[in-house]
Image (cartoon, helix red, strand yellow):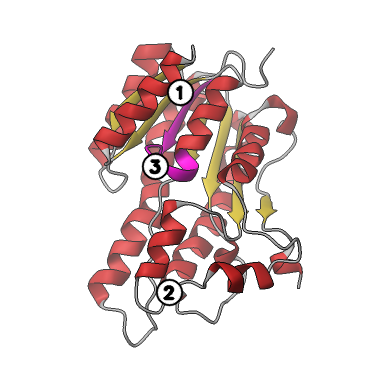
């Protein structure tokens, strides 16, 4: 018996990295999953892989900055699987710039994807979650949304801090409807986004620098985050809302 048996989930940013691992793990735990991204070829490959293993998954094109894309993704979940129980706002981008180096356009792009995307996903999903009798929203923030840093991520940190507080407001406003909302705060995780951050001038640390800053002595795996997301999506977390789950190897405890 899976921990998510009978649940239908919608996951953004699911074509690769952390989101793809979440989609695979959700289906292995019995959920039906609709997952979206702008990387359509990669997304369709993940869909095929999950189905070959017997999982129920549907890929949809989803630009998280588009309200109509979100509405279509929610409609697809309800049409394909009959309801919506879980939303995972996973999609995000990172850009390393100092405050003086960052352009207004770069700042706006970070907030469009990382903060407005979470708002739009939540807004589009709430009616379906309410119709299902309640559910769980899991917002992927970051340890950068909890503490400052010294490697040029002021814009990224600001978006993730916004996600943290939006999560708490959502939790309070919709608790009476049985809709829970929590945030997950990963430390350094071995994903394509982490590798891309190193390719951007002034952003990110080397693997060795990352490891030196983590008490457990390693960079996290996408599965480390996915396990936390599965827990928050499941009925095991029925008394957990408005909370922050930090998965960082002890980094923010230092």
Q: Say which quarter of the image contains residue 126.
A: top left
Above or below, 202 against 38 in this view is: below
Q: Residue farthest to the front?
A: 208
Residue at x 40%, y 79% (from the top left corner): 202
Earlier sequence position, callout 2 versus callout 1:
1
Residue at x 75%, y 35% (from the top left corner): 239
Q: Say which quarter of the image contains residue 127.
A: top left
Residue at x 28%, y 63% (from the top left corner): 109
Asked if labels 2 and 3 touch by Cβ distance under 8 angstroms, the answer is no
In this picture, which residue range is highlighted in magenta?
8-19
Which residue carries the number 2 mark? 203
Apparent side of residue 84 relative to residue 216 in the rendered image (left or right):
left
The reply to whether residue 251 is visible in this rendering is: yes
Asked if labels 1 and 3 touch by Cβ distance under 8 angstroms, the answer is no
Which residue carries the number 1 mark? 33
Q: Quadrant of the C terminus?
A: bottom right
Indicate the secondary structure of the residue bearing disc 1: strand
Indicate the secondary structure of the residue bearing disc 3: loop
Earlier sequence position, callout 3 versus callout 1:
3
Apparent side of residue 119 relative to residue 75 in the rendered image (left or right):
right
Q: Which mark is residue 13?
A: 3
- Between circles 2 and 1, the one closer to the viewer is 2
Above or below, 131 against 230 in this view is: above
Above or below, 181 against 148 in this view is: above
């Amino acid at each position: 018996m899976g921990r998510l048996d009978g649940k239908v989930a919608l996951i953004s940013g699911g074509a690769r990295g952390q989101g793809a691992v979440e989609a695979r793990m959700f289906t292995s735990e019995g959920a039906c999953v609709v997952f979206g991204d702008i990387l359509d070829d990669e997304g369709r490959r993940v869909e095929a892989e999950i189905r070959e293993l017997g999982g129920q998954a549907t890929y949809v094109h989803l630009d998280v900055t588009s309200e109509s894309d979100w509405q279509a993704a929610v409609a697809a979940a309800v049409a394909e699987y009959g309801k919506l129980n879980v939303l995972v706002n996973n999609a995000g981008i990172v850009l390393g710039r100092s405050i003086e180096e960052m352009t207004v356009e770069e700042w706006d792009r970070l907030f469009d994807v990382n903060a407005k995307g979470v708002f739009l996903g939540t807004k589009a999903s709430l009616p379906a979650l309410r119709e299902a009798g309640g559910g769980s929203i899991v917002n992927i923030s970051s340890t950068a949304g909890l503490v400052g840093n010294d490697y040029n991520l002021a814009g990224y940190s600001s978006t993730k801090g916004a996600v943290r507080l939006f999560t708490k407001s959502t939790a309070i406003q919709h608790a009476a409807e049985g809709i829970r909302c929590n945030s997950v705060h990963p430390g350094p995780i071995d994903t394509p986004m982490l590798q891309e951050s190193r390719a951007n001038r002034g952003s990110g640390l080397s693997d060795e620098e990352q490891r030196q800053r983590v008490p457990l002595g390693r960079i996290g795996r996408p599965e480390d985050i996915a396990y936390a997301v599965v827990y928050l999506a499941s009925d095991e977390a029925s008394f957990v809302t408005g909370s922050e789950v930090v998965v960082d190897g002890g980094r923010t405890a230092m």
